[in-house]
Amino acid sequence: MTPSSSGSPAAELAPSPAEPLRFQVLTALALHRMATTSQLRQMLRPDSSRQLFSRVLNKLRSTGFVDLTPLLGKDRSRTHAWYLTPEGARLTRDLPALRGRPPYPITSTTAASLKTPHTLTVLRTHLPFAADARRLGHEHGPWDWTPEVAHPIGEGERLVADAVMHYTVIDGEHRLKLRAFVEVDRTTMSSERLAVKLIEYARLFRYEAQPVGRRRLASAGPAWLRWYPIYPRVLFVLTGAARARLRNRISDLQAMAAQHPLVAAFSHEVPLGAAILEEVEKHGPAGSVWVPLTSGTPRPWTDL
């Protein structure tokens, strides 16, 4: 891949500095649910100062559009996670970047504290992809990562992906549009429950919705075609435990892909991979940190 110039599509896709930063912050909090000051800076304007974002956030808080919940770091230092108030959620309802996307506002400090660890880790996973896109001249900005996307999989059940990612690889005049379901595992569930997510993705791949109250007609194809021209690849990102334990969880995902008949058939059709979040942050998603769930050596996520 060849890095693009400053006039690249990736630069054009990023939030425009001409747009008021307060609107960008409100949009980011509406889409991503919650973020720290540092995360907002990395996502929206990585070349700007933390003080600029602090001023904007404090102004938005004083006008009643955002609030915060305290976080305690490993070094006992204190920081905060920001989220929209009900008034802020109403204000952002019709923003262009959020049209067609269901709102999931966090409207109280109690709700924020319950959702903070997972929500911030999902956003933390997004940031290395955004940094890679800027570095490589690809297209992937703050609005190309949608958390908590639900799809029906039959029998009244739904699959809720932690995030859906849209990413366009630019190589000269060639554009390759990639999509991915992203599952973020903080080692808060059993390894078996994590691996069962693969069954749900395999069910979505095969699921065909039928009109209610009508005879079965000729199939219109899988339901996922309503949203995606190609079924998104599935990426598992693991953190929250020692490397050995995380690698064991990746092995369990590989075992599910090999042994479960539905998942095994699915794995021949859709790229599946897993990586440790700290390695993604250190080497970038374009590094050889993704373990294929079928077989093979670690590689970039685009090569799964």
Image: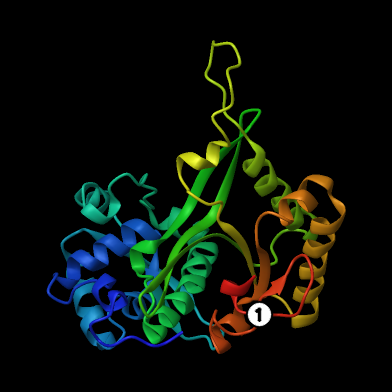
Q: Report the residue at 47% width, 62% height from top.
A: 165
* Residue 129 pos. (x, y %): 47, 75
* Colouring of the image: rainbow
Q: Which residue is mark 1?
A: 299
* Residue 87 pos. (x, y %): 22, 50
* Residue 55 pos. (x, y %): 20, 79
Q: Amino acid at mark 1?
A: Arg
Q: Report the residue at 38% width, 88% height from top.
A: 3
Dot 1 falls on a residue whose secondary structure is: loop
* Residue 131 pos. (x, y %): 42, 81
Q: Is residue 149 above or below residue 275?
A: above
* Residue 194 sits in quarter: bottom right
Visible residue check, residue 166: yes
Q: Nearer the viewer, residue 14 or 267?
A: 267
Q: Report the residue at 83% width, 46% height from top.
A: 261
Are there few (<14), some (14-19), or many (20+) residues within 10 Å of tag 1? some
With 293 as the anchor, is 162 left or right in this view?
A: left
Q: Is residue 26 above or below residue 200?
A: below
Q: How many tags in the picture?
A: 1
Visible residue check, residue 185: no
Q: Report the residue at 57% width, 23% height from top.
A: 210
In the picture, the quarter occupied by the C terminus is bottom right
- Specify the farthest residue to the front: 173
- Specify the farthest residue to the right: 259
